[in-house]
Image (tube, grey):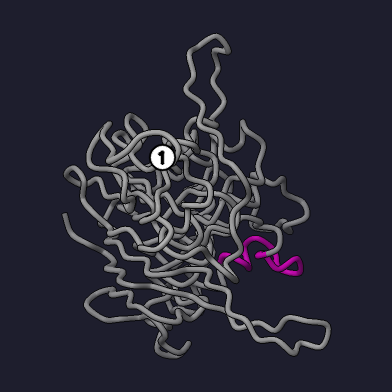
Amino acid sequence: MTALLEIRGLAKRYDIRLGAFGEKQAVVRALDDFSVDVVEGETLSLVGESGCGKSTTGFAILNLQRPSAGSVRYKGQDIAGLDEDAMRPFRRDLQIVFQDPYSTLNPRMTIGEALAEPIRFHGLAPKGEVPARVARLLEDVGMTPRFANRYPHELSGGQRQRVAIARALACQPRFIVCDEAISALDVSVQAQILNLLLDLQEKYGLTYLFIAHDLAVVRHISDRVGVMYLGRLAELAPSQALFAEPLHPYTRALLSAVPEPNPRAPRNRQRLVGEVPSPLNPPTGCRFHPRCPLARDICKTTVPDWREVVPSHHVACHAVTGPGRTNWEGPA
């Protein structure tokens, strides 16, 4: 398998000021030591609670927010931290679909103008061929060319998201970050957009980083799933393996909270205690230890190693020794 992106030690910190007069300086550690290879043609999903750093990861990979540390290698070059002029040749290949398409589409531009803009900017077609390219893009996302004359406010939420996907496709990319791309849509429309993304992936050989909080959706679309907690990866595994046998206590708790269609089905619920700690002052050692039912003294002082417990299944937990096995059981 060929790695399209090689990400190593990616971190993003924000300097902020606290207090009534901004007299106290602090650092928000939104992303810390994120490392993964994104395989060409796969869908890698990131899940976790709000504020765990999923979207920040996507923005940092695309250099939409300049990383504080780490590297992102694409085509043999580290693109992390490049200025906008140096990034321009890579923008065609690396695109993003945001959560709210209405805020990313210019309300004064027709849909046709919005789709034509990246084609003209990157010189992807002669002027006379641009309308035909726009029409093909609309057809690719299940819309007719007549939508080219409409404005964003004339479209439904699902139609606007299709336009946002078409705009990303306009550059003929290889890698697309889908940042909560369906979470604002109705459930029936979510299924349509998911199937559209899968069809486009097969047609154009796309690679996705799919950021979401709905685990049922992630299970449907993903090849691999990364579980994030407070800016760090807690577990990474093939989708089927992770949903069949999660290893990290945090992953188990997330999966046990997924609604079960059969209310009488046996459930082994593992409720999360407390709230996610502040990234202003993350816990020492394992960041999950204040909420973990298996926490011990070592968890409070030592950051767990990132280990491949079984082939292709990685986890950062002192307790986990293998599938269904831990160093200790029950509360401390």
Which of the two residues, 165 or 130, is positioned nearer the viewer here? 165
Where is residue 327, by image quadrant? top left
User: Magenta includes 113?
Assistant: yes
Residue situated furthest right in the rendering: 20
Amino acid bearing label 1: Ile
Mark 1 residue crowding within 10 angstroms, few (<14) / some (14–19) / many (20+): many
**Viewport quadrant of the C terminus:** top left
Which of the two residues, 330 or 312, is positioned nearer the viewer here? 330
The residue located at (76%, 87%) in the rendering is 22
From the image, tell me which residue sits under label 1.
Answer: 221
Q: Is residue 135 above or below residue 25?
A: above
Magenta highlight range: 104-115
The residue located at (39%, 57%) in the rendering is 233
Tell me where residue 131 appears, x and y as whole percent: 54, 64
Tell me where residue 325 appears, x and y as whole percent: 26, 34
* Left or right of 20 on screen, residue 24: left
Tell me where residue 291 appears, x and y as whole percent: 53, 47
Tell me where residue 245 appears, x and y as whole percent: 32, 32
Q: Label 1, secondary structure: give it.
A: helix
Where is residue 173, by image quadrant? bottom left
The residue located at (47%, 45%) in the rendering is 292
Q: Is residue 154 above or below residue 331?
A: below
Q: Is residue 240 above or below residue 166?
A: above
* Left or right of 195 on screen, residue 257: right
User: Magenta includes 131?
Assistant: no
The residue located at (53%, 61%) in the rendering is 55
Q: How many marks?
A: 1
**Viewport quadrant of the N terminus:** bottom left
